[in-house]
Image: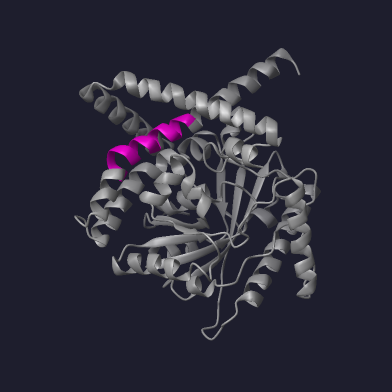
Amino acid sequence: MSVGEMIKLLAVTAYCHFAVTLLCLNVLFDLTIFGAPLFALHKIQLLSSTTFLRCSTFLINWTTPIVFAMPMIFSGTVLYCNDTDLLVEAKASESSLLLSNHGSRIDWMVGMLIGFTKHLNGKSCERVRVGFVCEALIQLMPIVGWYRKFVAQDIFVWRSFKQDAPTIQSNIQDFIAAREKRMLFLSPEGVVADFGQKDFQYIAACRKFCLEQNYPPFDYVLTPRYKGSMCLLQNVKGPIISVCIAYVQDGKLLNCRLLSPDRVVPDIYTLNGGIGGSPVEIYIHLKRMVIAQDVCDPKAVFLENYREKDRLMKKWDEQLLAGTANGETWMNQFSKIESNHLEFALYQISHTLLMIVIGIVSGGLYTLALVFGVLFLLVSSCHTIGSLIGSTSMESVPFETGLKAIAA
């Protein structure tokens, strides 16, 4: 590696740490100044559930753009969608459910961006709150996990859909009763397959399960978790949409075959690293799922859907390997999701100015600067040490690389 390449690598790495630190500072500020008091007022019943959800939606719309702006806007990430009309319909619905493959650690950022955007393929659409159904440990992750728990009111599953059904139903009904629109985002695979021994054992178990169900083994996706999912399918009032996301960088499919040595699990650092000249392209495939009212066991529905996703990812791999992915025949199915860079720059500037003004007024400007410095040291050291221990970056939310590497 030349000196110039080394300097570029260090600069991009520093930018990535800075971007994640800024994300943490902004979210921590919004959580402390606005989110925590709002949650406390709701808990002591000075705010009704309806008022709390509406106020938290306003806060989320203020916080959301500074979460994904640097990794998904300023770092050059480009998004495409094959059916923006279906997406507009989902955003206009009282509640909708998006079931996505789980080939990355930043599917949630994709969901937040499409929920936040107000223009799709030349059409105006609603800015809508996006919620997530995710593993319960996420809520314990510092800062972003806490925000998703106390402000966003995501659905956290401790055991299984079936065992946590009352919690899931209660959460959905609270939003419906408050007439607060929300798109629910769920990855039925439940986990991301990394590169450890347990990960490869789980991939083998999924492939074996496919054979037991008379399906060919899936090469690009894990088998979906379907038990108890009817509590989700029966409670949403809008469309249920299959989502298949392909991540492409430098003409290569990142979420390629699960057993491929070339596979990459994109995370926040992958997106932020695009600032160095290799931005990630994200292709979103949507398809309406029609589920019969009398379906009691969704296993066949989920497995068939995942066979389609597996075939679609295989097509992506073949197109990229053949060098035809950029041809009109393939690309004509997609529309680019345009982003207003000025709007997101103004959000970033507004957040920064608000923090500085409150810091000056309260006499805490030095404390604010100190917190940023401490966060930068924590973010950079946690990620660096975790990457060395685990041999990969695993940053779906800040600090996850270090925490998972230590826990492994």
Location of the N terminus by quadrant is: top right
Say whether residue 218 is visible: no
What residue is shown at x 46% (from left), y 39% (from top)? Answer: 142
Return the residue nearer the eye: 252 or 102.
Answer: 102
Q: Tell me where residue 344 appears, x and y as whole percent.
A: 40, 37
Magenta segment: 21-35
Where residue 29 sits in the image (x, y, percent)?
34, 35
Inspect the magenta stretch and tell me whether residue 23 lies in it: yes
What residue lies at 78% left-to-right and 43% top-to-bottom?
262
Query: For the stretch drawn in magenta, what is the main secondary structure?
Result: helix
Q: Quadrant of residue 52?
A: bottom left
Front residue (pair 361, 343):
361
**Depth check, front residue: 344 or 209:** 209
Q: Position of residue 47 (x, y in %)?
A: 21, 56
**Res. 298 visible in picture:** yes
- Relative side of 347 to 209, left or right: left
Q: Residue at x 31, y 51 (%)?
A: 56
